[in-house]
């Protein structure tokens, strides 16, 4: 079920809203002065959301960004970049058979 609530109500009942979204799979739209500000949706649905303002090229870059490894402050950036490049070469060889 999709419903609209104002910011003040959302602030007061945030825990309850999260429970309803998680357990009942409700969708909650939060508004301020009649203008929609945010939508809370179940996490399962978030993977299927299409963003019309993102171009196909940007989508490819976002997917590539998500595939990058997580590094810490202790990791050597040169080593991390070398590993990324090595994996890209392997992918390229597998894809094009060279």
Image (cartoon, rainbow, N blue to C red):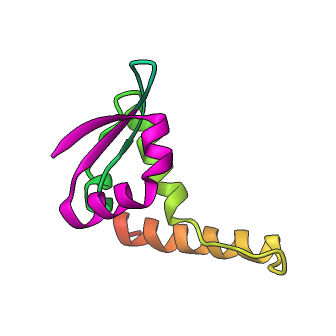
Residue 84: x and y in percent read 62, 70
Specify whether 19 is left or right of 92: left
| Residue at horizontal 80 percent and vertical 70 percent from the top | 77
| Residue at horizontal 42 percent and vertical 52 percent from the top | 13
Of 10 and 85, nearer the camera is 10
Residue 65 vertical position relative to residue 79 in the rendered view, above or below: above
Could you say which quadrant of the image residue 47 lies in?
A: bottom left
Of 9 and 95, nearer the camera is 9
| Residue at horizontal 45 percent and vertical 65 percent from the top | 92
Q: Which residues are magenta?
A: 1-30
Q: Residue furthest bottom?
A: 74
Query: On the rendered image, what quadrant is the C terminus found in?
Result: bottom left
Could you say which quadrant of the image residue 85 lies in?
A: bottom right
Residue 58: x and y in percent read 47, 38
Counting the numbered discs, the total is 0
Specify whether 46 is left or right of 33: left
Q: Residue furthest top?
A: 34
Residue 68 vertical position relative to residue 41 in the rendered view, above or below: below
| Residue at horizontal 76 percent and vertical 76 percent from the top | 72
Residue 54: x and y in percent read 42, 33
Residue 90: x and y in percent read 49, 74
Of 74 and 96, nearer the camera is 74
Q: Residue 13 magenta-drawn?
A: yes
Residue 53 vertical position relative to residue 29 in the rendered view, above or below: above
Q: Residue 57 magenta-drawn?
A: no
Could you say which quadrant of the image residue 79 lies in?
A: bottom right
Q: Residue furthest left?
A: 1
């Amino acid at each position: 079920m999709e419903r609209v609530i104002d910011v003040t109500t959302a602030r007061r009942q945030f825990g309850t809203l999260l429970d309803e979204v998680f357990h009942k799979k409700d969708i909650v739209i939060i508004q301020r002065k009649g203008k929609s500000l945010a939508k809370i949706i179940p996490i399962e649905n978030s993977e299927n959301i299409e963003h019309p303002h993102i171009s196909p090229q940007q989508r490819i870059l976002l997917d590539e960004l998500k595939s990058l490894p997580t590094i810490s402050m202790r990791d050597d950036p040169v080593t991390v970049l070398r590993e990324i490049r090595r994996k890209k070469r392997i992918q390229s060889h597998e894809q094009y058979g060279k």
